[in-house]
Image (cartoon, rainbow, N blue to C red):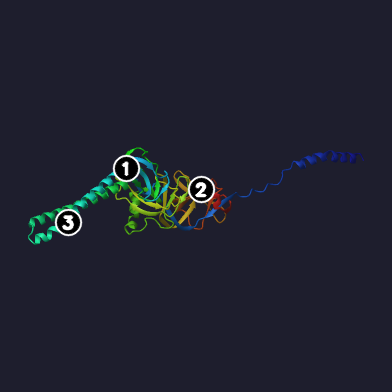
C-alpha cells in the first residue's frame, strides 16, 4: 500500500510537467502565401497611326488694314471696337466740308464747260450752211469745229474732276473692306489723318489660319502628295488644333506652303485653316497643330508603363502559361500617346505585365488579371 501511494503521488505531481511539455510543442508549418496579383495585357497586332505636332500661330484669313484715302480731320468713330463689322460698314468719318466745297466747285466748272460747248455747237450749226454757200470763209467753220471739239473735251475733263471730288467726299466715310472683327482704333477723334495713317485693322476670322513651320525632311515626305493636289496628311479626321487650355478644334484643311525654305532654320512655313464659327479664336494666339503623317501596319503596341529601362536597355516582364514571369529584352520604336511600338522581342498573343511586378525576378509565380484601360488614367 505504501508503494502504491507513492506512485499515485508521483503521477499527480508530474501531470503539470506533462501539461507544460505538451503546451511547448511547435505548431504545424503555416500555408505559403498566395502569389501576388499583377495586371497583364495581351500583345495584339494592329495598324498604328503616327502623329506629329507643331507650334502654330493663329492669324486672320484676311487682315485688312483700314487707312483713309483722303487727308482730313477725324470727327467720328462709327463702330464698336472689337466687334463684328460687315464689308462696307462705315468705321470712321473725316470732316467732309472741304470735300463738299470741292464738289460744288467741280459742278460749277461742269456747268461752265457745258455752256461753252453749247455755244460752240450753235456756231457750228450756223456756219456750216453758210460755208457751203460760200457766204463765209471755210477757215471760220474750221475754227468753229476746233472750238467745239475743245469745249467737248473740257466738258469731259470737268465731269472727271467732278467724279474725283465726289469720290473724295465718299472717301470721307472710311468703310470696312471685309467682314470680320475690327480692332481697337489706333487714331483718336481730332487727329489729322491721311493715306499713311493706320486707323484700325479688320480681320476675317471665319475660318482662321494657323501658320507653323515644318522641317525640310517633313516637307519632302509630303511634297509628292502636295504636287498631286492632295492633302499632305491623312484626311480623316484631318489636322487638329490644340489650344493652350487643352481643348481641340478638328477638321483643319491644308491651305498652302510658303514659296521657300528658310535658310536660317531649314524649315518651311505651312498654312492650315480651321473653322471658327463662334469667333473664339483670334489672331496672335499660340496653339499646336497635330496631324496623322503616316501609318505603321501590323505593329505591336505596349503601354509605356509596362516597359522598363535599365542602362539604355528596354525590357518587359512576360507572364508564361504557367503564370511564371520571364524578363524579356525588347526594342522600341515610335511613341504613340501613352504606348510604345515594340519592333522586336515580343510576339502577338503574349501577356505583358503592366502593373504589380516591376521588380520581380525571373521565375516568380504571379496571379494575372486583365489590365483595365481606366487604370491608365
- Residue 246 location, x and y as percent? 47, 47
**CB under 8 Å between discs 3 and 1:** no
What mark, if any, has residue 305 been given in the picture?
2
Q: Nearer the viewer, mark 3 or mark 1?
A: 3
**Local SS, label 2:** helix
Q: Is residue 80 shown above or below 250?
A: above
**Residue most extreme to the right:** 1
Quadrant in the picture for residue 19: top right
- Residue 242 location, x and y as percent? 44, 48
Work out whether residue 295 or residue 300 is closer to the camera in this orientation and state it.
Answer: 295
Work out whether residue 306 or residue 51 is closer to the camera in this orientation and state it.
Answer: 51
Q: Check disc 1: other Cα within 10 Å, few if <14, some if 14-19, many if 20+.
A: few
Classify residue 159 as left or right of residue 306: left
Q: Which residue is mark 1?
A: 97
Q: CA distance from mark 1 to mark 2?
A: 77 Å
Q: CA distance from mark 3 to mark 1?
A: 38 Å
- Residue 221 location, x and y as percent? 34, 54
The N terminus - image quarter: top right
Residue 180 in view of the camera: yes
- Residue 113 location, x and y as percent? 21, 50
Q: Earlier in the sequence, mark 3 or mark 2?
A: 3
**Local SS, label 1:** helix
Q: Which residue is mark 3?
A: 122
Amino acid at each position: 500500500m505504501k508503494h502504491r501511494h507513492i506512485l499515485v503521488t508521483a503521477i499527480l505531481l508530474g501531470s503539470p510537467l506533462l501539461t507544460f511539455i505538451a503546451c511547448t510543442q511547435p505548431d504545424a508549418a503555416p500555408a505559403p502565401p498566395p502569389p501576388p496579383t499583377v495586371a497583364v495585357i495581351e500583345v495584339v497586332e494592329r495598324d498604328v497611326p503616327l502623329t506629329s505636332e507643331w507650334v502654330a500661330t493663329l492669324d486672320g484669313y484676311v487682315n485688312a488694314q483700314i487707312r483713309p484715302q483722303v487727308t482730313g480731320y477725324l470727327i467720328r468713330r462709327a463702330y464698336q471696337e472689337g466687334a463684328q463689322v460687315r464689308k462696307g460698314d462705315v468705321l470712321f468719318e473725316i470732316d467732309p466740308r472741304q470735300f463738299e466745297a470741292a464738289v460744288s466747285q467741280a459742278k460749277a466748272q461742269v456747268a461752265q464747260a457745258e455752256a461753252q460747248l453749247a455755244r460752240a455747237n450753235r456756231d457750228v450749226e450756223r456756219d456750216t450752211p453758210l460755208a457751203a454757200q460760200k457766204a463765209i470763209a471755210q477757215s471760220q467753220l474750221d475754227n468753229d469745229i476746233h472750238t467745239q471739239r475743245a469745249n467737248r473735251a473740257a466738258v469731259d475733263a470737268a465731269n472727271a474732276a467732278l467724279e474725283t471730288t465726289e469720290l473724295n467726299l465718299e472717301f470721307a466715310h472710311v468703310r470696312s473692306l471685309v467682314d470680320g472683327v475690327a480692332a481697337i482704333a489706333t487714331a483718336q477723334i481730332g487727329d489729322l489723318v491721311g493715306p499713311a495713317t493706320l486707323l484700325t485693322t479688320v480681320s476675317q476670322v471665319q475660318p482662321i489660319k494657323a501658320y507653323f513651320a515644318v522641317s525640310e525632311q517633313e516637307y519632302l515626305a509630303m511634297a509628292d502628295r502636295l504636287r498631286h493636289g492632295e492633302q499632305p496628311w491623312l484626311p480623316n479626321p484631318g489636322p487638329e488644333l490644340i489650344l493652350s487650355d487643352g481643348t481641340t478644334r478638328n477638321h483643319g484643311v491644308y491651305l498652302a506652303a510658303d514659296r521657300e525654305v528658310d535658310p536660317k532654320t531649314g524649315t518651311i512655313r505651312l498654312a492650315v485653316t480651321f473653322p471658327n464659327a463662334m469667333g473664339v479664336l483670334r489672331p496672335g494666339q499660340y496653339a499646336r497643330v497635330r496631324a496623322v503623317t503616316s501609318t505603321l501596319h501590323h505593329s505591336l503596341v505596349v503601354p509605356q508603363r509596362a516597359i522598363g529601362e535599365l542602362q539604355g536597355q528596354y525590357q518587359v516582364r512576360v507572364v508564361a502559361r504557367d503564370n511564371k514571369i520571364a524578363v524579356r529584352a525588347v526594342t522600341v520604336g515610335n511613341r504613340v500617346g501613352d504606348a510604345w511600338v515594340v519592333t522586336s522581342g515580343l510576339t502577338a498573343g503574349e501577356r505583358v505585365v503592366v502593373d504589380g511586378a516591376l521588380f520581380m525576378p525571373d521565375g516568380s509565380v504571379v496571379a494575372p488579371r486583365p489590365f483595365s484601360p481606366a487604370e491608365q488614367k
